[in-house]
Image (cartoon, rainbow, N blue to C red):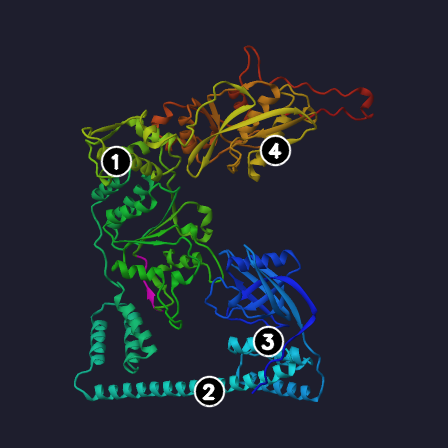
Amino acid sequence: MLSKLKKPMSDSGQKIALPLLPLRDVVVFPHMVVPLFVGRSKSVNALSNAMNLDKKILLSTQKNAGVDSPGEKDMYDVGTIGIVLQLLRLPDGTVKALVEGKKRARITRYTDKEKYIMAEVEAIAEPDIADTESEAISRTVIEMFEEYAKINKSISKDLINNISAISDVSQLADTVAAHFNFKIQDKQQLLETVQPMERMHFLFHLMQSEIEIYKMEQRIKGRVKKQMEKTQKDYYLNEQMRAIQKEMGAKDDYKSELGELQSRIKRKRMSKESAAKARQEFKKLKLMAPMSAEGTVVRNYIEWLISLPWFERSKLQADIGQAETILEEDHYGLEKPKERILEYLAVQKLVKKIRGPILCFVGPPGVGKTSLAKSVARATGRAFVRLSLGGVRDEAEIRGHRRTYIGAMPGKIIQSLKKAKVNNPVFCLDEVDKMSVDFRGDPSAALLEVLDPEQNFAFNDHYLDVDYDLSDILFITTANNLHGIPLPLQDRMEIIRLPGYTEYEKLHIAEGFLVPKQTEMNGLSKENIQYTGNAIQTIIRRYTHEAGVRNLEREIASVCRKVARKLTKEDGKKSFKITAQSIQKHLGVPRFRYGQVEEKDEIGLATGMAWTQVGGELLTIETVIMPGRGKLTVTGKLGEVMQESAQAALSYVRSRAGRLGLKKNFYKKVDIHVHIPEGATPKDGPSAGITMATSIVSALIKKPVRRDLAMTGEITLRGRILPIGGLKEKILAAHRGGISQVIIPDESSKDLKEIPAKILKHIEVITASHMDDVLSRAIILPPNETLFKEEQDEVIPPELIPKGEEAIRPHQVN
């Protein structure tokens, strides 16, 4: 046993005041670096105070870890003076501190401040010992630590080497004690033992006990492991005995299950290849153990083979008139896709075997692409299957995983056909432009086989590993933008564009479908709520900004909910009429500015027409001329193509300078700034070329542009006007904005047949092939004044003409 502890010696009796950090279930020794998680407010304040001063703090352990607000009686008298190395405040309000113990200290007095506890301490000096006994005990402790490290694999070799290199007896005792899980009372006693030799003897005694306990735990764990292995062996033998008993018995559940599976294989009508594969796999299954993992894989494979619709078909609709009626009932407008479906039904009626077409509906959100695919299924009498490809980035989602992988399954194509239970459904591949590519493969490349009529009659899924005929399926894909679909995939599909609804079509859809639907869904009747045509038109113009009708349906639903709320509150009034004037009470302040023509003709201000994903828009282009050095500035968040169009427009104006009455070098003395408002919206494309040229000419010659005229077209350097796209949406936007005349490229006049006759009655469409024609129409001139003037040839003085050569005349643009 150890002798009674001697009274510690002080370090010249000097006392210092330090913030106190009470510790729970941990003792910090000198030379020890330890992380601490601190949550009590006084402890956090003590750490903060220490960081603000010299980072010194007293680390003392509580006698009882359960006390939240320890006092003088709850603390041990001897602690460790430490240094706060790092302080990190965590999101939950606690603090993580990294502290290093420096030297032992005895607490002489406590001062309980409001925010934290201060302790007056005196450092404890440790005597230096260097004799044979200390060397012997040091070696013994190091050897015992190495023995402990052999049975405790968590101790690294680096730590053993570091401890072996310590020559100071006191530091060796503290360092070794820090790496053992002794009781708190034993660790505190080690801390309070100042004499190094006494501390080493006490440490040796504790290490012996700890190593014995650890060895005992290892022996117990070994016996438990052997017992578990014996239990597993017994279970295995019992299962074998049960299997033998079943083989000897008359009734065998597993055999009856195999018999039922075999009869299902015989009854199922499959292709020759799949039937042979099913029989081959069944032979393997009979030889396998009932509960084996491989047996489960083989059985699942057979289940997939016999559950697929190899020859089951939907009875197709033969009456084209009825199919046309169904399509018209479900959707208003959308003539092109309806016409294509009816053509397919007509050919199907004449030809016995026809491969299903592969259509791609491309259009903005909300125009009815997916719902049209459902209507096609209803009109043709087929089952409907939908597969969303948005976010799919794994090629195995289409083709499936091979059976060698754990949890392998067929691809989504085969899975969807199993759900459909027929092999000729309408298969809608939704959002085909939203697929992405990563290290797992390219799903769009896997779709090439699925959507190719020359290949999909023998589609090979990786899981099934047999050919499946997809040629009877009517594939319909949907997309918002064509540029998101790879070109090889586009080549395999018939692209049908759904450009969006006109205002007249939206009004018809709302009155005929959306209003009755939302009235019923919100528990109202026709007697409770009536919409005027102007009210719906106001919602379309001022509260929605889309090519489809989704937001329009939401706004109508919002009005219906507010009416339903009034019906439950107000007594007597059972009918509400929704007018254009009362819409604002139900839907609030209008969200969108309805495109309107400018109030007066302005210099440098021209109106263009633009196409967006949500329909057409009017585009105002402004130009100002300032003194400068020939710099062209284009603003309004424009793309590269639009900026190049501005350069081309200015080059055309410079080539026409003489005929427009401008000096040849006019551009050298001015800066031109072209701006397109709504600068936060990205804009691009070449179709604003003639509008920018008109705006620049108007600003240069100081003549206004007609405010009731809008234009669209791409300009070349020679002033030719090239065709553009999206004409229908652009002219609809001009009609909404009160424009009376539009100028379009001569080559785009063929697209006018797509525009409703009602629109063309209110707008005069002017075709132009050259920029001169556009300027003549757009620029307002005083009476008896012409825009284009005769260009005067520049006369070169005779003295500047070299002898024997003719004067060079400037090139005149006709």
Please tell me whether mark 4 or mark 1 is closer to you in this view: 1
Please determine whether, in this image, residue 646 is positioned above or below residue 497.
above
Main SS of the magenta part reads loop
Residue 468 magenta: yes
Badge 4 or badge 1: first in the primary sequence = 1
How far separated are the C-alphas under marks 3 and 2?
30 Å
How dense is the environment of label 3, judged by Cα within 10 Å: few (below 14), some, or many (20 and up)? many
Badge 4 or badge 3: first in the primary sequence = 3
Q: Amino acid at mark 4?
A: Gln
How dense is the environment of label 2, judged by Cα within 10 Å: few (below 14), some, or many (20 and up)? few
Residue 85 is labelled as none
Residue bearing the label numbered 4: 647
How far separated are the C-alphas under marks 1 and 3?
78 Å
Please tell me whether mark 2 or mark 4 is closer to you in this view: 2
For the record, the magenta segment spans: 465-471
SS at circle 4: helix
Q: Residue at x 67, y 80 (%)?
A: 166
Q: Is residue 459 left or right of residue 9?
A: left
How dense is the environment of label 4, judged by Cα within 10 Å: few (below 14), some, or many (20 and up)? some
Badge 3 or badge 2: first in the primary sequence = 3
Badge 1 or badge 3: first in the primary sequence = 3
How far separated are the C-alphas under marks 4 and 3?
87 Å
Name the spot of residue 361 as percent of width and height, x first.
37, 45
Residues 201 and 715: in front is 201
Badge 2 or badge 4: first in the primary sequence = 2
Residues 102 and 272: in front is 102
Q: Amino acid at mark 3?
A: Glu
Quadrant of the drawing holding the N terminus: bottom right
Residue bearing the label numbered 1: 565
Residue bearing the label numbered 2: 216
Name the spot of residue 797 as percent of width and height, x first.
79, 20
